[in-house]
């Protein structure tokens, strides 16, 4: 159980009849539940119902109320309440609150994923329904088309029930586990099992991944020539216009390309061989969008992160985001080039490479006090390799020289040069196109540190 939920229960299962008021109460002091924890707490209270809530609260009172004020009386009351809670709702393993809160803040993921990263994919369940297949379906209006996960036949599912695994979300959780957490952290001990579940999903031959920014710029006749003759059915979906579906989906195995319009979809299982991937990659009008999918596929950045985590090159407690640990030879080279000590060289690589080298993150990764961080920052600033500035929501004062991109929350703004290495394209609304739902590393960090140093311009 999350500590915030336990505090709310011990405080008397506090709540309000109105959903918004109930959630707001849980998020305020002294409970300070996160948004998702507040939602989970509300759902648990609902499952208890009125009778269950009264039973939990009644368990706090001993036969002799004076026992509450004796040593250990409150602890005994809490244990009795917990016993009734377990009888009514069942027991789940404790979850690391710090990790669960960080997952929610960084990735927008619920505590289910904290449990899965700690104990493996089967350590927790959510409302997601397994997909038995995927289909292309026409969108409500026009000639648009989308891919949909198909559940098993049966009663209609409740509104907004998720069907099929969110492969980009799972991949993002794994990237976070292998780049943001210290080596040997028990909170991510189940990441390898989660990775195997993701690989199994990507290996399903019927799985299609949308390439939302990728469109084959060609006529319908030429699309049919290039990607036919195989066809894939396109369901009507919730299309509102009358008449037949005005889209034809041409299926050549690795790619499904629709005409008119050229909307494209990738079949990951069909590009497991490097030679096949190279041929698909040669479809130049899809190159950028295929690059964004590549980190998830066999041999991509995520697999290389997994292999590095499994090989254990760093000592327990070290962070891959600390280049002094993940690539010490590069740090020594950078220090010689900049004329600084190793700490300043490491800070330069972090600023030059990572999307969110905030002061708080840098101190956590490097084990620095605020005083030491200031000393290193001053040494690095003296080289002219970075500049000092105040920028909204950056969480730091040291930056690479050059252009700046203002991404909206939940992503942090960052140096424009980093968009390419993170395979990010900002969109006009509060969204991005990227391999994952948030701006995350696309390769093992020691590789990205080396790439950032290689692209450094003369005189920087």
Image (cartoon, rainbow, N blue to C red):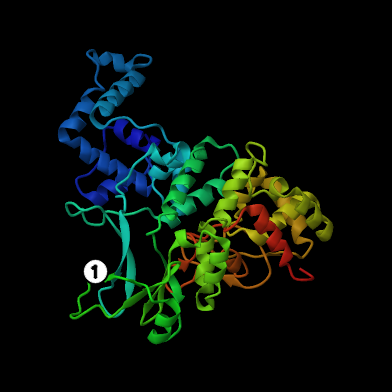
In percent of width and height, residue 302 lies at: 55, 53
- The quarter of the rendered structure image containing the N terminus is top left
Please give the name of the residue rendered at 26% of the width and 32% of the height, measured from the top-left corner.
Answer: 89
Indicate the secondary structure of the residue bearing disc 1. loop
Residue 209 position in % (x across, y down): 41, 63
| Quadrant in which the C terminus appears | bottom right
Q: Is residue 399 left or right of residue 25?
A: right
Q: Residue at x 47, y 67 (%)?
A: 432
Q: Quadrant of residue 119?
A: top left
Is residue 423 placed above or below 219 in the rendered structure? above
Mark 1, residue position: 237
* Image position of 319 (left or right of 377): left
Nearer to the camera, 16 or 117: 117
Residue at point 44%, 49% (across, down): 200
Can residue 85 be spotted in the picture?
Answer: yes
> Total number of numbered labels?
1
Left or right for 366, reference 96: right
264, above or below 102, in the image: below
**Residue 23 placement (x, y as % from top left):** 29, 48
Badge 1 local density, few (<14 within 10 Å), some, or many (20+)? Answer: some
State whether residue 412 is above or below residue 127: below
> Could you tell me if residue 423 is visible in this image?
no
Residue 33, percent from left and from top: 37, 43
Residue lying farthest to the front in this orientation: 229
């Amino acid at each position: 159980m999350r500590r915030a939920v336990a505090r709310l229960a011990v405080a008397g299962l506090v709540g309000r009849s109105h959903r918004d008021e109930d959630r707001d109460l849980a998020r305020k002091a002294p409970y300070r539940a996160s948004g998702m924890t507040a939602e989970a707490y509300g759902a648990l209270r609902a499952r208890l119902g009125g009778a269950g809530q009264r039973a939990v609260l009644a368990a706090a009172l001993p036969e002799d109320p004076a026992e509450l004020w004796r040593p250990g009386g409150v602890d005994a009351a809490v244990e009795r309440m917990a016993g009734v809670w377990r009888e009514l709702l069942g027991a789940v393993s404790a979850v690391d609150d710090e990790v669960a809160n960080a997952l929610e803040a960084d990735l927008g993921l619920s505590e289910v994923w904290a449990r899965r990263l700690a104990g493996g994919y089967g350590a927790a369940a959510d409302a997601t329904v397994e997909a038995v297949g995927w289909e292309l379906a026409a969108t409500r209006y026009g000639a648009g088309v989308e891919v949909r996960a198909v559940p098993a036949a049966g009663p209609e599912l409740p509104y907004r029930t998720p069907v099929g695994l969110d492969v980009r979300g799972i991949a993002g959780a794994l990237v976070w586990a292998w780049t943001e957490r210290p080596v040997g952290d028990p909170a991510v001990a189940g990441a390898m099992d989660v990775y195997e579940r993701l690989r199994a999903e990507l290996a399903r031959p019927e799985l299609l991944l949308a390439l939302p920014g990728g469109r084959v710029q060609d006529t319908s006749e030429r699309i049919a020539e290039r990607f036919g003759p195989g066809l894939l059915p396109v369901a009507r979906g919730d299309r509102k216009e009358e008449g037949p579906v005005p889209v034809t989906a041409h299926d050549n195995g690795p790619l499904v390309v629709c005409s008119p319009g050229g909307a494209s979809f990738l079949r990951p299982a069909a590009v497991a061989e490097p030679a096949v991937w190279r041929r698909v990659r040669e479809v130049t009008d899809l190159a950028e969008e295929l690059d964004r999918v590549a980190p998830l596929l066999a041999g991509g950045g995520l697999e290389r992160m997994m292999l590095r985590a499994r090989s254990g090159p760093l000592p327990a407690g070290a962070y891959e985001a600390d280049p002094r640990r993940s690539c010490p030879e590069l740090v020594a080279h950078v220090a010689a080039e900049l004329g600084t000590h190793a700490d300043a060289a490491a800070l330069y690589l972090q600023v030059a490479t990572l999307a969110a080298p905030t002061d708080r993150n840098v101190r956590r990764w490097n084990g620095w006090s605020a005083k030491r961080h200031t000393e290193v920052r001053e040494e690095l600033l003296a080289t002219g390799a970075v500049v000092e500035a105040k920028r909204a929501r950056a969480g730091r004062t040291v930056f690479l020289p050059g252009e700046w991109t203002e991404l909206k929350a939940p992503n942090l703004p960052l140096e424009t040069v980093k968009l390419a290495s993170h395979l990010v394209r900002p969109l006009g609304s509060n969204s991005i196109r990227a391999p994952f739902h948030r701006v995350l590393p696309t390769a093992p960090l020691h590789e990205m540190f080396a790439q950032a140093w290689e692209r450094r311009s003369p005189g920087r």
